[in-house]
Image (tube, rainbow, N blue to C red):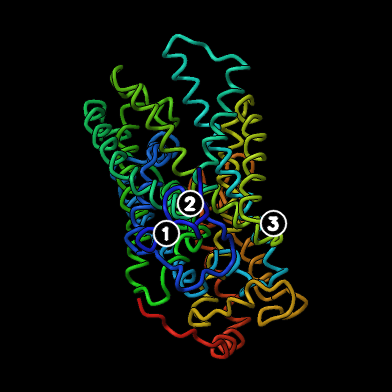
Amino acid sequence: MARTEAEVVVGGAPSLTSIEQRGIEHIPHDNRWGKPSGLFWMWAGAVWNVEFVIYGALAVIAFGLSFAQAVLIILVGNVFYILTGLASLQGPQAGTTAFAISRASFGPRGNKLPSFFNWVTQVGFEIEGIALIVFAAILLSLKAGFTAGIAAKVVFIVIAVAIQAVLPTLGHAAVLKVLRWLAIPFVILFAVMAGLTTSKVNLHVPAHGASWGALMIFLALVISAGGLGWTENGNDYSRYLPRKTDKKAIVLAVALGGAIPSALLEILGAAIATGVPGATTPNGLVAGFPGWFIWPYLIFAIVQLFAINTLDLYSSGVTLQSIFPRLKRLHCVAIDTVICGGIAAYAVFSMHFYTLLSDFLLFIILWLGPWCAIYLVDSWLRRNRYDHDALLAERGGRYWRNGGFHWPAIVAQVVGMGCAALWLNAYSPYVGPLASRIGGPIGSDFSVFIGLFVGGLLYYVLTARQIRAEGEATPVPAQVSG
């Protein structure tokens, strides 16, 4: 029987079966049991995932990059995991989650806008993961001689949603511990996959590579699916670290925990794609493996998808709580699970799943770049000082400002999104005017960089003096030893 985290604490950390009761509530310092190494293994356990092999395969198959070009862009793009590391520094200081801390930038009411964007993003990734899990289960059943009909697919969806809810329900400690345990077998699977596909690789295909515009489009995908795409989750997991934890250790642990597996898996995907044209889907990768490996591959793929989905479901729950503070974290997990299951069922039975998925992935970058820049600039200006009581106050307090809105942040967010849209290449539903005119036949994509630059610069220009003064006026809690 599961127990609450207050009932069982082993070695300073809650046991695996304890249920985390806190959501966005402030974490008292004597309950801070986390270490940077725990973050490294958590991120590694989540990112050692078949999804990143597919991202690498897209470089060759969808964008026409040569293998050398793909490796270069993958290495450059994964440097941006430093953003995830920087977006994990606020949690230990504020003792709360990312979208509770975001209230310092946007105000308690103004913050509901980016919180809603993030909630939709996290739930979207959950739906993607559940659908891919069900597709893998359907293929497994087919390999076993059973063709899954409508009833079987419904059963697969229900089982997948139920399993997916377990770790997010248990909470923070269970997420970190289980993902740490999974990291090692996932590394072994990577090594086996690399060995088995060596004979399929043809590194000279395509021979001439792609235009610089195509390189920039793929770079935007790598950044948004990796380092930038995880910034909104960072502090949800770092907030259990003590305030005195070394900042460089946090940044390095998070950045390397994400970047190392991401880069290796994407390079593997690009290599496989030179010899396996169907490698842009989990099931398509099967063509590159011998028959005996298909079963363990699909089983591991399912476990990996559950692992990465765990981070999304946990973060979507605490994000929903930041929008509706009266809800408990467990209520939010239950709500998100039901919504995820219902929409995932539609996705599984839809003939347009991959079109819906690609459109979703392309458009989330519009809000994420400006928000990340505003969030980090705000943290830098206030020297990472936060009033945790004011962050969680629904009325009044240091961050209430103009009726709960901080309009400079909202203006910077909206303008940043508008400018990013000018150079977004979300072919075919939308191609921005700059994206279509610059970069060759397929255009280019600088939306990631424009969103970051415009959102961050405009917020700095509008608020630098105010936020510095606000930070200086915020008391620094006394350091607690041990």
- What element does badge 2 sit on? strand
Percent coordinates x, y for residue 481 in the rendering: 36, 80
Residue where numbered disc 1 is placed:
9
- What element does badge 1 sit on? strand
Q: Nearer the viewer, residue 163 or 259?
A: 163
What residue appears at the point 36 percent right and 60 percent down from the top-left corner? 255
Q: Nearer the viewer, residue 376 or 422?
A: 376
Label 1 vs label 3: CA separation?
25 Å
Residue type, numbered disc 3: Leu
Residue where numbered disc 2 is placed:
18
Alpha-carbon neighbours of circle 2 within 10 Å: few (<14), some, or many (≥20)? many
Q: Quadrant of residue 389?
A: bottom right
- Please say whether residue 213 is visible from this viewpoint: no
Percent coordinates x, y for residue 223 in the rendering: 44, 54
Q: Quadrant of residue 350?
A: top right
- What element does badge 3 sit on? loop
Q: For the residues carrying marks 3 and 2, which lies nearer the camera in this image?
A: 2
Residue 327: mark in rendering: 3
Query: Tag 2 or tag 1, which sits nearer the N-term?
Result: 1
Q: Nearer the viewer, residue 421 or 387?
A: 387
Query: Tag 2 or tag 3, which sits nearer the N-term?
Result: 2
What residue appears at the point 45 percent right and 36 percent down from the top-left corner? 62
Query: Tag 3 or tag 1, which sits nearer the N-term?
Result: 1
Contact? badges 1 and 2 (CB < 8 Å): yes
